[in-house]
Amino acid sequence: MSADDNLNPDTTPEPGEGALPPKHDPAAYKPSEKELSAFKKTGRRILTVALLILIGGLLFGGWNYYQDYRAVMATADQHKNFVPTLRVASITASPATIQLTLPATTLAYTQANVFARVSGYISKRKVDIGDHVKKGDLLVEIYAPEIEYQLAQAEATLAQTKATVEQNVANMQLAEITDQRNSPLVQRGFVSALNGDTYRLNVDAENAQVAASKANVLAQEAQVKVMRQQMYYQQVIAPFDGVITKRNVDIGDLVQGDLTTGTTMFTIMHDDVIRTQVYVPQNEAFGLTDGIKTNIHVPNLPGKVFPGTVTRVADALSPDTRTLLTEIDIPNPDGVLTPGTYCTVELFIPRKTPSLVVPSQALIFDENGMQVAVVKNGRANIQTVNITRDMGTTVEVDHGVDAGDYVVLDPPVDLENGQKVKMKKPMQQASAE
């Protein structure tokens, strides 16, 4: 090996000449100062960059938090100072009358079932269903010849009874004369007292016979009247003006005239005036009296109104339904209305207690009961009300508000008592029916 080779440590020996130089041994390698200094500078740069990134992230997060906080506080301030604009409606006083509509059914003013009072066969029939009749018109004739024989027998018995009266009167007169003639003889003793008492008591007996026979005459006369009335019953007449709505007999039919199995021959209804009945609820019943005007509407006759009048009112409410039975008469001169028709009755009942009309949209129901928000001096005042009548879109209250007040419609759930509010153009509240 030459000297130059010893001086150059990087000279690679020939294969097989010896081990590698020390710098190629990882365990024996030591970095130089320059390398160490460069490595430290690189580490400090990386640490500085990481620190700056961390500080930048913290600053960015803090700034975002601050901006969110400012937005939340601004929203809170805006909400605190926000004055909502709400729809309102005015409160009006209830009208002087209550308009109430109830269902009803028309009835005949007068209705009668015509029965036979004598037994016999129908010999004539003068009317049929739908015929209008006047009071006293002949409806049917009943053929019952045995009634004529019974009448003749009753008249003969009456004549016999009258003859008996005349006979008894004659006997009474004879007894009176006999007593008058024998009374002086009894006093003088020519006739015994026993015979005298007999003559006197015969007079009393004959007087009693006369009285009894006269009573028999009266009884027989009444029987004759009954038989004559039975003769009249053979002709059945209309009891009042009306229309025939039902017929159950025809010529040749046998009818029975007794009370238990009497035959119903006709049904007659008086239709010049129609009657209807309604049941008025308790809330409106206290103002109901005779003479109140009504309007009757029939669904099958649109646009036509039938005026009526309350003519009869029950004195007491029904305990089961708390309603008052009311009867209404409806003039029907042209016969347009017929009994049994469904209709609606519109009543105009005078109001006994004043009330105020509030829209149902204004009601607030919570643990404090039924309330409304009244706008006064630019603030919402929540006030409790008492509902007396519910009409669907509106209610009637008796206290808690005044006529002319404005109430909030559809109040927000977060509306507080005393909160500042603005009103939109007020809605004109319709009066209650």
Image: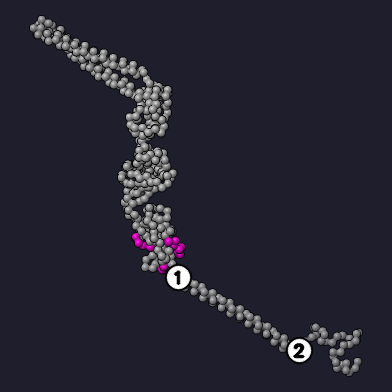
Q: Image quarter for residue 41?
A: bottom right
The percent coordinates of residue 90 (x first, y second) are 38, 61
The percent coordinates of residue 77 (x first, y second) are 47, 73
**Is there any visible trace of residue 64 in the rendered image?**
yes
Q: Secondary structure at mark 2?
A: loop
Q: Secondary structure at mark 1?
A: loop
**Residue found 12% across the figure and 8% down from its top:** 182
Q: Which mark is residue 231?
A: none
Q: Provide the residue designation for mark 1.
A: 82
Can residue 256 be found in the magenta stretch?
A: no
Q: How many marks?
A: 2
Residue flagged by tag 1: what amino acid is it? Phe
Residue flagged by tag 2: what amino acid is it? Ser
**Residue found 42% across the figure and 26% down from its top:** 250
In the orientation shown, which residue stands out farthest toward the bottom?
3
**Residue found 31% across the figure and 16% down from its top:** 152
Q: Image quarter for residue 333?
A: top left
**Residue found 61% across the figure and 80% down from its top:** 56
Q: Earlier in the sequence, mark 1 or mark 2?
A: 2
Q: Which mark is residue 32?
A: 2
Q: Which residues are magenta?
A: 402-422
Say which of 229 and 77 sits in front: 229
Q: Is residue 177 above or below residue 416?
A: above
